[in-house]
Image: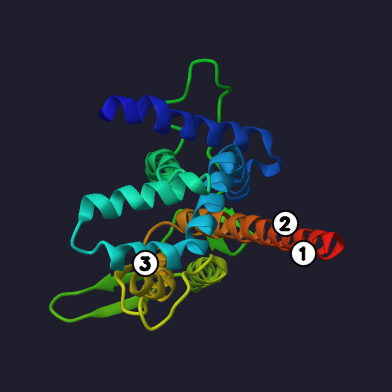
Amino acid sequence: MSSIFHNIFYLPALNALALLVFILPGHSFGLSIIFLTIIVNTILLPLTHKAKHAQRKMQELQPKLEQIKRQHKDNREEQARKQMELYKEHGINPFSSLLLPIVQIPLFLALFKVLQLKGDLFATNLYSFMPVIESPGNMFLGLINLSDVGLKMQFSPQFVFNILNPANVLLALLAAAMQFTQLRMMPRPKIDEKNKESFGVIFQQNLTFTMPVIIFLIGSTLPGALALYWTTMSVFGIVHEGVVRRRAQALTQNNEQRAITTE
């Protein structure tokens, strides 16, 4: 399993980043991370778009799904059968959203591993046909050292933290803010008295606030390259979500106009 991860995800990610460093002006490590993140997310865009489309449809069906759960709460098999019938009726494949994480998770882990290599980034594991890559410039915008951490945390014997690089901490804050913005833009389940205490609703509400905190802690205590990667990924997601929203609104308006014209 480790060899599959190494050959299919890690090596391509490492060599793609190395090639970008070689091509881009100034051999900028930071600019290469931004371009690689955009390229990867663009390649995954069809899967992402399909998953978002299915998610929005399932959010619209949430009241009917809750109704099915209440009606068949004592018969799980009948409950599952009715839910699948509802999905089929509305052309939804509930498993389509699972394909995206199957691809995203190992790819993210590969990029995560690559971006932690710091100065030894291109010392080994380059393909034989790759050009000779000089050590990339780790400074981004002349302020942020992408190979350094922003905070150093100590948990024992008492909890203390030291700010090592304020610019890296600010980059981690930016990553957390972009993550929060992206989560706030995501479609939310309709909340009423019947489902306000359901696991799904509570989980999504808590995730909106806990995930940015996690991203800040990761981004500030690990090399700044990871915070830059996450910031770029979140900005890409925000732009995509905005485009999807506008298209959905335009489609709704067109349908309403057609309905008025027909009447």
Residue at mark 3: 66
The residue located at (44%, 78%) in the rendering is 191
CA–CA distance between discs 3 and 1? 27 Å
Residue 210 falls left or right of residue 254: left
Q: Earlier in the sequence, mark 3 or mark 2?
A: 3
Residue 6 falls left or right of residue 166: left
Q: How many labels does the image show?
A: 3
| Mark 3 secondary-structure assignment | helix
Quick check: marks 2 and 1 in contact, CB under 8 Å?
A: no
Give above or below for 228 relative to 191.
above
Q: In which quarter of the image is the N terminus?
A: top left
Q: In which quarter of the image is the C terminus?
A: bottom right
Mark 2 is on which residue type? Arg
Mark 1 is on which residue type? Glu
Q: Which of marks 3 and 1 is nearer the N terminus?
A: 3
Mark whose residue sits in front, 3 or 2: 3
Which of 24/248 is in front?
A: 248
The residue located at (59%, 43%) in the rendering is 45
Choose top left, top right, bottom left or bottom right for residue 74.
bottom left
Quick check: marks 3 and 2 in contact, CB under 8 Å?
A: no
Mark 3 is on which residue type? Glu
Label 2 environment density (alpha carbons within 10 Å; few <14, some 14–19, many ≥20): few
Residue at mark 2: 247
Give above or below for 236 relative to 191.
above
Label 3 environment density (alpha carbons within 10 Å; few <14, some 14–19, many ≥20): some
Residue 123 seen in this snapshot: yes
Q: Residue 256 carries which label?
A: 1
| Mark 1 secondary-structure assignment | helix
Residue 245, position as x, y percentages in the image: 67, 62
